[in-house]
Amino acid sequence: MKARSLSFRLLSAAGLVLAAFFFLVALVLEQAFQQSTEQALREKLQIQIYSLLSVAEMNSSLQLKMPAILREPRFSNPGSGLYAVIRLSDQSLVWRSPSSVGIELPVASQLKQGEFAFVRDSEQRFVLHYAVMWENEAGFERAYVFTVAEDGQFLNNQVAEFRATLTGWLSGIGLLLVLIQFLVLRWGLKPLRQIGADLEQIEAGRKSRLDGCYAAELQGVASNLNALISSERAHLERYRNTLADLAHSLKTPLAILRGCVEEPVVNRETVHNQISRMNEIVEYQLQKAAAKGQANLTGKVDVNDIVDKIIASLTKVYADKRIDYRLAGDKACRIYGEEGDVYEIAGNLLDNASKWCRQQVRVALTDLTDSSNQAFSLLMVVEDDGPGIVEEKMGEILRRGVRADENIAGHGIGMAVVNELVGLWGGRLLGDQSPELGGMRWQVYLP
């Protein structure tokens, strides 16, 4: 697994979170276990004190007597870990168990009658003090402090054993959860790996598009990638066609120029005409190659604003004709696409209309996003009052690869580019006679 992969990052993050969680859980459980163990030990020591109280007797001289043998045998064995001491309220020693010989137990601070005090001394012993007021048969009273202590090693061993058991279980569960998380990540990221594998297949030429069954969240990505792949292939095909058309178109002018050079007297007019023709051919083919035809992968452009700018430029170019331009329709016409492509489509249509109109050019923009026609979002209509084009020649000027010298005058290279560009967008181009102005009317439907 690579360190920069999503799986590694997610698995590392999940592992760190699990480790922190289990550490806190282990800490809390260990503290809770230790507190519960100490509480159990306190209750146990309290029972031992009650046991000592039950066997203690006070004689007439106010002296407390304890039996030689106690119920708890550990009190009789030195070093057994269980110790008992009885003191007066003034801290003087009254009695100590045989097990406590040589061991100094802490002295209780001021305790009220019937009060317990549970402490841990410097030797890690757990000590329980109990203050009691003893009354003999004669009615005399004396205050005593019963102290019972037990070594903390037993409790420490229990806590250590619990810690080891807890660490083992939590480590095992943590590793199991990390393994499960790894399997879940592999299953969850499988669609991404599938897309990556399919892209490698496309790069190797064994596939033409992403055709796998991907997760719903990746369908949009796959669709956009397919659109990008199709667009790039269309560009590549167009570049190849453009180069082929350019090479084929330049053969005849080059042959004529070669013949002129070989003649004794160079015909300058013929050379000039052929150079102009070659320049037109190159311009036409470059114009076709520059068309992008992308409608889905870019930002939105304002078609209304672009048409306004084109009309302002054409008004200066054709100032001598005093053309009456009129732009009508929706003001907010924004579509996804390249601004340069919109300039190509609208510019060529308006330039041809301006060139061949008598005095009027009309442009209408209609937003189709709210209409029943879901395939297109914009309709652009450009019409003029010129002579128009006969229906029989309409197909000729729109077919792909028409060379500059083969186009109908006034509707040549520009209309070929418009037709190809609209097709690349997935749009529709229709041409007929304008019912109002009588000249040419072009209708462009864009998705």
Image: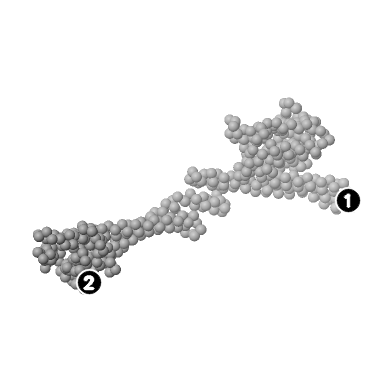
Residue visible at 29% across and 62% down in the picture: 159
Is 156 above or below relative to 348?
below
Q: Residue at x 85, y 48 (%)?
A: 271
> Dot 1 surroundings within 10 Å: few (below 14), some, or many (20 or more)?
few
Instruction: Work out whether mark 1 precedes mark 2 in sequence or the reverse, and give the earlier one.
Output: 2
List x then y, in percent, for residue 150: 23, 65
The quadrant where residue 175 appears: bottom left
Residue at (85, 50) in percent of width and height? 260
Q: Does the rendering let one see residue 180?
A: yes
Q: Is residue 219 above or below residue 379?
A: below
403 or 123, which lies in front? 123
Front-most of 271 and 8? 8
Residue type, numbered disc 1: Val
Q: From the viewer's perspective, tell me whether residue 337 is left or right of residue 214.
A: right
Q: Which residue is mark 2?
A: 103
> Does residue 183 appear to the left or right of 212 in the view shown?
left
Residue at the image position 73 percent from the left and 39 percent from the top: 309
Whether residue 93 sits left or right of residue 423 in the image: it is left
Image quadrant containing the C terminus: top right
Residue 438 % position (x, y): 75, 27
Residue tagged by mark 1?
266
Quarter of the image for residue 160 reads: bottom left
